[in-house]
Amino acid sequence: MPYWNSRGLRGSTLEEFVNLTNEEYLRCSLAVIQKLPTSIKPIRLDKEKGTISLAYFEQKSTVDYMGNIQGIPVCFDVKETARESLPISNIHQHQITFMEKFTSQKGLAFLIVYFTKKDKYFLIPFKDLKKHWEIAQKGGRKSIPCKECCERYEIKREGVFLVHYLKAVNAYLQDNSD
């Protein structure tokens, strides 16, 4: 079972940038996106300080964010890697299952990935993520290379939007309109 100081809380700088961007999206009436809390069960409490010194995650989380962009239901997870590719091991079966069910209900699911070595952010649509996931499950490549990310889905900072992913979402929707 993962603990509070475990691998589960990586990428918090990226999450903070996404949180600030989401606040601006809300302020500008562009989207309503919320960070989903991960429920924890406290084990050791310091009642004098009012702090939790040991806890474990009660259940597996699904994705980091969920909401609505101009009438489109969305869910997404954020990942950060110092490598030139995102290891598939950073994505869990329960996340794939949740995103698959979400897209089957006409929602849009994706990853926002920050490749720190390249200093680049990309939106990776669920259909691309699933393709890479299935290849890895069959013994093939176990990562998603940055160089295979679609340039149209690169996410840039723009004004107050630190991780302006709505442009990448729009590009994806344009590329996949019926």
Image (tube, grey):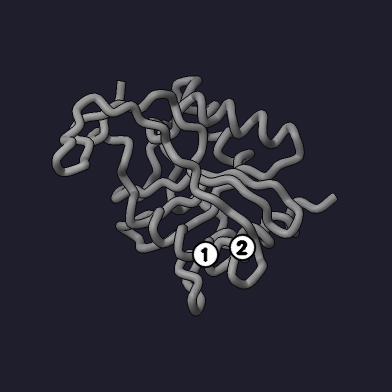
Per the image, the residue denoted by label 2 is 166
Q: In which quarter of the view is residue 47 placed?
A: top left
Q: Label 1 vs label 2: CA separation?
A: 13 Å
Q: Residue at the location (60% across, 34% down)?
A: 99
Residue 78 falls left or right of residue 98:
left
Residue nearer the viewer, 143 or 65: 65
**Residue 80 visible, this orientation:** yes
Q: How many numbered dots are placed on residues in this image?
A: 2
Does dot 1 land on a helix, a strand or a loop?
A: helix
Does dot 2 land on a helix, a strand or a loop?
A: helix
Q: Position of residue 125 (x, y in %)?
A: 60, 46
Q: In which quarter of the view is residue 166 placed?
A: bottom right
Q: Position of residue 70 (x, y in %)?
A: 73, 59
Kind of residue at disc 2: Leu
Label placed on residue 23 = 1
Residue nearer the viewer, 149 or 96: 96
Q: Residue at the location (48% across, 76% down)?
A: 160
Query: In the current view of this chain or complex, which residue is farthest to the front?
Result: 48
**Earlier-in-chain disc, 1 versus 2:** 1
Q: Position of residue 52 (x, y in %)?
A: 22, 36
Q: Residue at the location (55% across, 48% down)?
A: 124
Q: In which quarter of the view is residue 152 placed?
A: bottom right
Quarter of the picture containing the N terminus is: top left
